[in-house]
Image: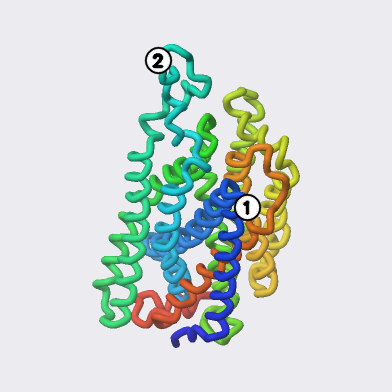
Amino acid sequence: MRYNFTKSNRNLALALMGIGVIAIIIGFLTNPHRTWASLLVNNFYFMALSLAGTFFVAVSYVMQAGWSVGLKRVPEAMGAFLKFSAVGMILIFIFGHNDLYHWTHSEIYEKFLPDGKTPNPDFDHILLGKHGFLNIPFYMIRMVAYFAIWVGFTWILRNESLKEDLEGGLKHYKKSFKFAAIFIPLFGITSSTSAWDFLMSIDAHWFSTLFGWYTFMGLFVSGLATMCLIIIYLKSKNYLENINENHMHDVGKMMFAFSIFWTYLWFSQFMLIWYANLPEEIIYFKTRWDHYRVIFWVNFFINFLFPFLVLMSRDAKRKMKILMIAGIGIVLGHWLDVYLMVMPGTMKANWGGFNPIEFGIMAGYAGLFIYVVLNALSKAMLVPQKHPMLKESLAHHL
């Protein structure tokens, strides 16, 4: 059965996109600096959701996981958004880098003013030491490489999956396994280095050896929650009838487990920096503690205590309503996590609380994401017809 992308769903997605366009226009007219930051928050976050879909598909192949075959069209469809986020990220950097990344300002690398004698008050010797890595040409090369890898492997895995539906046999399954095995280590490297580039370089004086892992875990758990919500939506419309509480139990277990692992990384990064109390390290948390303290702690509690308490029991992981509540909390919570990575570094103490423009931009990105994912779902059978592990998936029982 194919998903029917109804006119009402299209209109809803288009309406949200319209809100986003209006918010962006008003934002650039009133506060372009903050608007660029908000665009980065949302472009990165929805890119992460999409990338998590491709990662889930690849991991399922490498682990030869049979249980997830019946729902694999959902993460495949999530990956369809990556090409849009690639365009968005490139445009945001090209036109907004001066507002987002201090290291792109050429004047900070000059020791003297144009007269050659007067010391330059803006000279930054720390960033001069990092200039071999943090420079615009090399940054652009890395960014294009990231998206070439991510979009390329997303297309390959999706294409092999669709060919498998037409031709059957083991040929396309084996090819998918091979490409997934190549993608996983590439993803492991690029997920960390892209986090350094897109997010950590906003606070260019600061660094953390845990930041790549931390960002990846937020990416993956929010992607799992999004996948869970899409499955619940499809089941509410009488699709995916063979996906039952046993499959959802496994999805719920992963949401529960990786929320805890995200917390472990959050605490480890925070505690080690706090304990060492080195000025060059604590600057990152000091900014967030001084000016963003409420959302700093809300971020921790909504992304740890909420899913921990809601999903702790076995029964909770098998009930659609509870999974939906947990999924919504995780999706919103990790959007807040990305917000907290970007805004303090760009707005500093000039934040002044949440801005309606930011929620409008988030609505626009959500609308585009919904449109792209649901449209991708409508292009193929919701359940792979000739996957060699389909029977195992349909008979999955816990």
Residue farthest along the front direction in this orientation: 115
Asked if the residue under mark 2 is in contact with the one under mark 1, i.e. CB atoms within 8 Å, the reply is no
Quarter of the figure with residue 281: top right
* Spatial CA span between label 1 and label 2: 38 Å
Please state if 234 lies on the left or on the right of 61 as rendered: right
Name the amino acid type tagged 1.
Thr
Instruction: Give the vertical position of 236 relative to 98 (above or below).
Output: below
Residue farthest along the left direction in this orientation: 171
Q: Position of residue 210 (x, y in %)?
A: 52, 38
Q: Residue at x 42, y 28 (%)?
A: 130
Residue 338 in view here: no
Quarter of the figure with residue 275: top right
Name the amino acid type tagged 2.
Gly
Residue 335 in view here: yes
Of marks 1 and 2, which one's residue comes earlier in the chain? Answer: 1
Q: How is the image coloured?
A: rainbow
Instruction: Give the vertical position of 148 relative to 267 (above or below).
Output: below
Question: Which part of the image, by quadrant, shows the C terminus?
Answer: bottom right
Please name whichever residue, 356 or 265, is drawn nearer the observer in this view of the structure.
Answer: 356
Please name whichever residue, 56 or 397, is drawn nearer the observer in this view of the structure.
Answer: 56
Residue 40's disc is: none
Q: Residue at x 70, y 63 (%)?
A: 313
Residue holding disc 2: 116
Please state if 334 lies on the left or on the right of 173 as rendered: right
Q: Residue at x 36, y 54 (%)?
A: 147
Q: Residue at x 32, y 56 (%)?
A: 181
Residue farthest along the right direction in this orientation: 294
Residue 30's disc is: 1
Q: Position of residue 279 (x, y in %)?
A: 61, 23
